[in-house]
Image (cartoon, grey):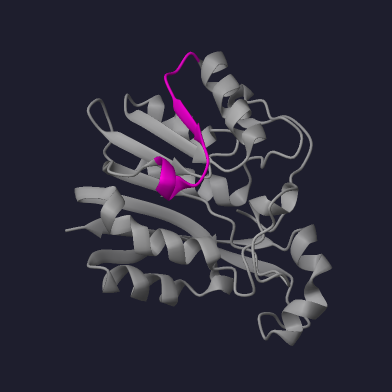
C-alpha cells in the first residue's frame, strides 16, 4: 500500500472507512485500471489480499465475479463488509493472514496491494495504521510471500495483479514469479509525489541507498503474472 498516509475526505463511489483503515489512493487507482482490463464475469473466482475499504473487491463483484477479500485488520474487515452492504453486492470478507484463510482454494484472479514501504523495523507492525504500509527493511516482506504463494492460489490460466513501489525492486518481483513458473510482466506504471511517510524517512532511506537527496517522487508499478 502507498507510502502516503491515510487521508481524510470523501471516498470514491460512496465508500466509507473506519479510522485507520487504508483509503484508496494512487496505487489503488493504478491497480483498478489493470483490473478493469481483465476478463471477469459470473463463474470467475477472485481473491483480494489486503482489501482495506474493499474498493477493488467491490469492483470485481460488480462484474459478477465471486469475490473473497482478506485483511489482517478487523477495522478493514468491518469497513469492507459495510461497503458491500451499502453497495448491495455479495462479498466474502475474511479476517487474518491470506494464506491461512485460503488453504486449498484456487482463484481465477488474485489482486494485491500489499504493504510495500521500506521501514526501519525488520518485522511488520502488529497494530496501528503503519501495518498498512510498513514491510521490512526492503519493503518486500509481503511481496515475497505473495510471489511464493501465487502458484498455489491460482487456477491454470489464472492471473495475479500486484501493485508496489519501484523502490522495492520490480525486477526481483518478476524474477521470483517467473522462477515459480508464472509468466510475469510489468503492465502499468505511474509516478506520484512522495507522501508524508517517505518524507519522514528520507534520511533513513538515503542511508539505505533507497533514495537520493533530491528525490521526491516514486514510481508505482503493476505486475501481472499468469499461471500457464
- Residue 97: say if magenta: yes
Q: Is residue 185 above or below residue 111?
A: below
Whether residue 141 is visible here, answered yes or no, is yes
Residue beneath the point at 54% across and 66% down: 141
Q: Specify the segment rendered in magenta.
A: 88-101
* Residue 133 point in image, percent of width and height: 65, 56
* Residue 74 point in image, percent of width and height: 63, 34
Lateral position of residue 158 relative to residue 143, left or right = left
Q: Is residue 85 above or below residue 77?
A: above
Lateral position of residue 50 relative to residue 63, left or right = right
Q: Is residue 214 above or below residue 217?
A: below
Question: 223 or 119: nearer the eye?
Answer: 119
Lateral position of residue 106 relative to residue 175, left or right = left
| Quadrant occupied by the C terminus | bottom left
Whether residue 34 is visible here, answered yes or no, is no
Residue beneath the point at 54% across and 33% down: 54
- Residue 135: say if magenta: no
Amino acid at each position: 500500500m502507498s507510502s502516503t498516509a491515510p487521508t481524510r475526505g470523501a471516498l470514491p463511489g460512496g465508500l466509507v472507512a473506519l479510522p485507520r483503515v487504508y483509503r484508496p489512493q494512487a496505487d489503488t487507482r493504478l491497480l483498478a485500471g489493470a483490473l478493469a482490463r481483465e476478463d471477469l464475469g459470473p463463474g470467475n473466482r477472485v481473491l483480494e489480499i489486503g482489501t482495506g475499504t474493499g474498493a477493488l473487491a467491490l469492483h470485481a463483484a460488480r462484474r459478477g465475479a465471486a469475490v473473497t477479500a482478506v485483511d489482517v485488520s478487523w477495522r478493514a474487515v468491518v469497513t469492507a463488509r459495510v461497503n458491500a452492504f451499502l453497495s448491495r453486492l455479495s462479498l466474502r470478507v475474511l479476517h487474518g493472514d491470506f494464506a491461512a484463510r485460503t488453504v486449498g482454494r484456487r482463484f481465477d484472479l488474485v489482486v494485491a496491494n500489499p504493504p510495500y514501504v521500506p521501514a526501519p523495523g525488520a518485522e511488520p507492525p502488529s497494530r496501528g495504521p503503519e501495518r498498512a504500509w510498513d514491510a521490512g527493511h526492503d519493503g518486500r516482506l509481503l511481496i515475497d510471500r505473495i510471489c511464493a504463494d501465487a502458484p498455489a492460489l491460482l487456477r491454470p490460466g489464472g492471473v495475479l495483479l500486484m501493485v508496489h513501489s519501484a523502490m522495492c525492486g520490480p525486477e526481483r518481483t518478476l524474477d521470483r514469479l517467473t522462477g515459480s513458473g508464472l509468466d510475469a510482466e510489468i503492465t502499468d506504471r505511474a509516478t506520484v509525489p512522495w507522501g508524508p511517510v517517505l518524507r519522514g524517512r528520507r534520511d533513513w532511506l538515503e542511508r539505505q541507498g533507497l533514495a537520493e537527496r533530491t528525490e521526491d517522487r516514486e514510481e508505482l508499478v503493476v505486475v501481472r503474472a499468469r499461471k500457464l
